[in-house]
Image (cartoon, helix red, strand yellow):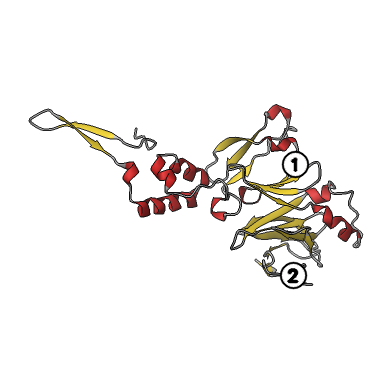
Amino acid sequence: MTSVGASTATSQHCCSGCGAQKAYVLPWESLNADLLKLIAYRVLSSDLLHYVWFRAVCKQWRANTPSPRGCGVVDPRFHPRQWMMFPEGNGLHPGHPALGGYIRFLNIYSGIFIRVHLPCFEDHSVLDCPDGLLLLQRKKDAAICLLHPFTGDVAEFPPLASLCLYMSKFGIFLNGPYDLRLRMVHAAVSVHVGGSITIMVALSHAERMAYVSTGDKHWTHTSWMMTGMRTALPFRGSLYMVRRSKNKPSHIMRVNPPDSSSSSSWPSTPPHVQLI
């Protein structure tokens, strides 16, 4: 069996006629820098954890490839898209004492499970898992944060409570920031040039959408409704939603996030709604 984790490897064979042994050294550390970066990019495009293991081969490889720690949220290359938080069931919610602070994640392509120690669930609850990131709500003040489960990087955002007053104008009365209708969300994450992050959420039970970007003091709501919205899935910053109407077949629609330079609200009609 070949070991990839060693910085050097030797192979011995007998020379014909003399029986002498000769060792061949595989110079992993002297791999061409451009070739190393090309291989690293290919590995990263397949799976973030494969990239982490790749960088662990030797000091030289680690020094010549960018670390995901510190930029796991603001750099979309390091988003763990192949991974999702695995629901344990049987009442074992994240933060349950029986789990000991560990959460299992499932690779949706390979079926591999890993356990990650995330003590943050002692004072946070999870709302969604877009692109493998965890959208969390802090219990003491209902603030929203986006956590990378493998690097520990965090981006913080204002509470969803800023939507309560707005929704009351439309007859949707919420019982504060912990209302169930504010917790049942479907989220998509997009990162703009310069590292600005936008989170777009679909509040399926309220048939509304909202977004927030880095530096905003409150969430921006839509002035339109998504009637018949049932569920939504994120992909590359957009939300793909199942929309059902009476006496009509269900449709899958795409809603793109607002442009980073947009004003404080979306247009009066749904932006970039496309029928799939």
Query: Does residue 57 lie above or below 253 as drawn?
Result: above
Quarter containing the N terminus: top left
Quarter containing the C terminus: bottom right
Q: Residue furthest bottom?
A: 268
Q: Amino acid at mark 2?
A: Ser
- The answer to which image quadrant residue 62 occupies is top left
Give percent across and percent down for residue 30.
32, 45
Packing grade of label 2 (10 A; few <14, some 14-19, many >=20) is few
Instruction: Tell me the CA gap for discs 2 and 1.
Output: 31 Å
Q: Of residues 5 and 236, which is closer to you in this image?
A: 5
Q: Which residue is mark 1?
A: 125
Q: Which residue is mark 2?
A: 263
- Mark with earlier residue (2, 1): 1
Give percent across and percent down for residue 261.
68, 69
Give percent across and percent down for residue 146.
68, 49
Residue 218 placement, left or right of 194:
right
Q: Which residue is drawn at the image coordinates 54% and 54% (left, top)? A: 77
Q: Of residues 224 and 24, which is closer to you in this image?
A: 24
